[in-house]
Amino acid sequence: MTEPTPLQNDTAATQTDLQTAAANRSEARITPEEVAKVAKLARLRLTDEELTRFTGQLADVLEHAADLDLLDLDGVEPMARPIPLANVFRADIPGPLLSREEVLAVAPATEDGFFRVPPVLGESE
Amino acid sequence: MTSALEIAASVRAAERSAREVLDEHLAVIAEREADVHAFNLVTTEHAIAAAVAVDELVAQGGNPGLLAGVPVAIKDNLCTRGVATTCSSKILQGWVPPYDATVVSRLAAAGAIMVGKTNMDEFAMGSSTENSAFGPTRNPHNLSLVPGGSSGGSAAAVAAGFAPISLGSDTGGSIRQPAALCGVVGVKPTYGTVSRLGLVAFGSSLDQVGPFANSVAEAALVCEVIGGHDPGDSTSIPQAFPSVSDHLSDGVAGMRIGLITEMMGEGISPDVAQRIRAAAECLAAAGAEVEEVSVPAVTYGLSAYYLVAPAEASSNLSRYDGVRYGLRVEAPTTGEMMELTRTAGFGDEVKRRIMLGTYALSAGYYDAFYGTALKVRTLIRRDFDTAYERFDALLSPTSPTTAFAFGDKTADPMSMYLNDVCTIASNLAGHPAMSVPYGVGTDGMPVGAQVLAPALGELAMFRVAAVLEGSLV
Amino acid sequence: MSIDLDVWEIVIGLEVHAELATATKLFCAAPNDFGGEPNTHIDALTLGLPGSLPVLNEHAVELAIRVGLALNCTINRSVFSRKNYFYPDQPTNYQISQFDLPINGEGWLELPSGKVIGIERAHLEEDTGKSTHIGGGGRIHDATYSLVDYNRAGVPLLEIVGRPDLRSGDEARAYVVELRAILVAVGASDGKMEEGSLRVDCNVSVRRHGDAELGTRCEIKNINSLRSLGRAVDYEAERQIDMILADERIEQQTRHWNEDEGRTLKLRSKEQADDYRYFPEPDLVDLLPSQEWIDRVRARLPILPAQRRLRLCERSGADLAQAVLIVERGLDDLCLAALELGADASRTITHAEHNLSDPKAQGLDPKMFAKLTNMDADGILSSTQTKTVLAELVQLGGDPAAIADSHGFKAMDSGELDAVVDQLIAENPEQWQRFCEGDPKISGFFVGRVMKATQGQADGKVVAGLLSERIPTAPKE
């Protein structure tokens, strides 16, 4: 077996270093207030028990993700998608539609061809 | 178990009827499904109608397709027209799509017979199928152990003989890991080679549909049938699926294969590691040059994945709000209605990932979390590219352990995520990877060997897999 | 308006959303049609059904490039992003838009007055569905429930963000008129504010002249006409000035223009900016229009309103105000064509300005229009007669000479008219004496008689001229 290829960047750490970094972290990576805030943003309602439990669990994941802090990412381009495609288009030609009947048949509430929802108050836009 | 290839050949030649084949498989389902719970829905009527149609076509001298009469199980996050598609979630309970996913129509056009929609971790989030809202699937080799996830139902369906082939989806390992745990072949193709149109989105830049099968050859055929350009998917590569079926027996003589160092370390169970080394030796014996190779950035794959995937998921799952379809919990205002609906409709793991993803994208945190993860993705791709300058394919375990017991990892989500350490990097890079059964662990449960290849390197990947498979006969 | 513009400066920036005139929506093949029964222009993507995916409409990009070039913008590599927020008219609870990399970069637009207004950017995004609020008089705050129609969801929009270079309600209106004319000229949009295919949001702030910093701005929505735009700007500027003078802090807000009450009302505070969690749309790929494509679009760009105005002024002698009006009416091509065919320039411009407000006028035959202007200029027809013939020409077409004939408008030559005038003078010596003496009571007598005698065919001005020629220069004995 040959030597493994040298590490790509000098500041990347070994397994033990990663564990130490995680253990040494004294601040929680996410607070209950922040969890409550993102829950609201995501339209989720949490009980007090869930808030505590989820905060701990999310903090664990973010702790683990702290290993990324050790990387030197200067000048590295973000990769939003893994394929080098560009300029994918569709011609401006009408295509098949869904029938309103089929669609409204599975809707929770409808009226006169519309989707019916409770009053919309104080939302954005 | 008759292979899909044999079934298709005999149905096309009118030696067997599709109906007969179907009835055989329905009988197996009737016998074992209560124990295994691979399905959310067995589509008996639908299947019978399809089988009858295939038989009629054959009788008229028509060509019923490459998978004529072959029963197939479809993961319940693939849209099937007129057939409930739930993603194993309460929020989509009873939703019936008005259209078929592209892969579903391609299978149907090839004459395959859908026997049912398989159970999964809710919205494909999980590694054990314990996150299903409708109860877990059990590993057919040992009913007290998990089948893996998130495509546990599809893996189990093939392992239990319910269908010779099935479809799953893989975002971080959700085809390969259950394939390994259930002792079947599972393939995640190159990102963009199989259409995502009709696949309920989880992590859009990571998701791919792929097959489970009992053999490399069957898996190859299914890939060729479902793969190839789809103008309805903007991320679909504009070419046909790489042609691999004709080259499966090419062997590996002269190929350079690298055993990934970082995936053979501490987190891997020793019996699993031993099987992978045996696989490496097998390939060497078959004429390949096998060496260890370091792909350093893969160490960071788990962290990057658990920022990227939940971020995309948090947005993809916003549409489930009780307005247009699915579950609705009534309330005095729409805002509350959305909140109550989502709270009642989503399970804990889904909620965790939505919140994690929302956090990773939120103002002030984007650069530190999501932005950083996207850069790490580039590093992973770069390190793979470097490795592929010297190697044609790579080798690693698929899963760090064999199948574990129910409840083993549910208390600590992080422990569950660690199941994905070997599979995740390929999704981040968009590369193909597949799991081939390679013996058993000390507990007698299946071990999977993972073969990795560069983008559009399916040919090399399948060749290696075929040799590994052949060595166990 | 009671603002002292010597003291205060009003700063206005407009965000204009234009519905693009494509056959189908931005990311799917459902039709881009106005009206229609609710939820009948929908497909899987319009509803954001699970598993649906967006595919970009090439023609929408073409139109965006046209507008970008017409506004002198750079055409950039661009990326689509998701703007995440929950609202029932947004089927996926995110909007696909463009955030940090829009297709059109910085540009500018020149107002008819010559003032240049900067364009910050223009980007593509999808429209939302529409909610109707039932109960409580249709007002969102008192509704008992809401109904949602997704026909409009996914329609392509181009959002054009102008720099805060505008300084008055009039300038704001002029900007919208010019922008709309450009959009219509390049075929990108039909630009109808009242139909919602052109939507204007207005950012207004105030400051004292000489202040380097801009004041806190408020965004005003629900402006549905040019008139509302002007009124809203004026109202909001006064509101803010009053607050400053009363030592009150202006909060950054989104405000709603109430047309009936003539005032803006707070909709929501913008001080806690919404967290839209923008990230690159993973279901779409980068948009990189090739240089060939951009060059082709540029080569095919039609003449723009500013160029039309210039051309008309240069070739016809029209002044700027006339040119603005005539170009706005779409009559400049007609005028120039008529001029080529020998039309009288000044009559052409005058008629285009005053007598051709009917949209049908665009269909006038330039040859016939030219002929008529000459009949007018030569005095063959009186101005009243000319107007009548012109109106009929617009409605029914035909030949002005024939039309004049059919009305009995004879071509009166000057000799005939002289004879009529002379005869009337001879028949009415007393009145003639008084006329020559300048008796005001008799001033209209002869013109009236001539008109009667000629059945209204004489040109009043010409007659007056003939009469005054005959007034003796030496006083009568």
Image (cartoon, rainbow, N blue to C red):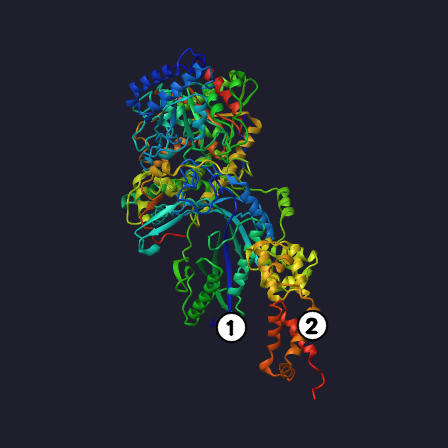
Q: Mark 1 falls within which chain? A: C
Identify the image quadrant of the C terminus of chain B.
top left
Q: Quadrant of residue C396?
A: bottom right
Q: Mark 2 falls within which chain? A: C
> Height in image: B18 above or below C197?
above
Rendered location of residue C388, percent (x, y): 58, 62
Residue linked to disc 1: C7
- CB within 8 Å, label 1 to label 2: no
| Badge 1: residue crowd in 10 Å (few <14, some 14–19, many ≥20) | few
Quick one: C404 or C172, which is closer to the camera?
A: C404
Residue linked to disc 2: C418
Rendered location of residue A49, percent (x, y): 27, 44
Element marked by disc 1: loop
Q: Which residue type carries mark 1?
A: Val
Mark 1 to mark 2 CA distance (whole Å): 63 Å
Q: Earlier in the sequence, mark 1 or mark 2?
A: 1
Residue B265 can be seen, yes or no: yes
Horizontal side of residue B418 vs C18, given as left or right: left
Pointer 1 and pointer 2 on the same chain: yes
Element marked by disc 2: helix
Rendered location of residue C277, percent (x, y): 43, 47
Rendered location of residue B257, percent (x, y): 53, 23
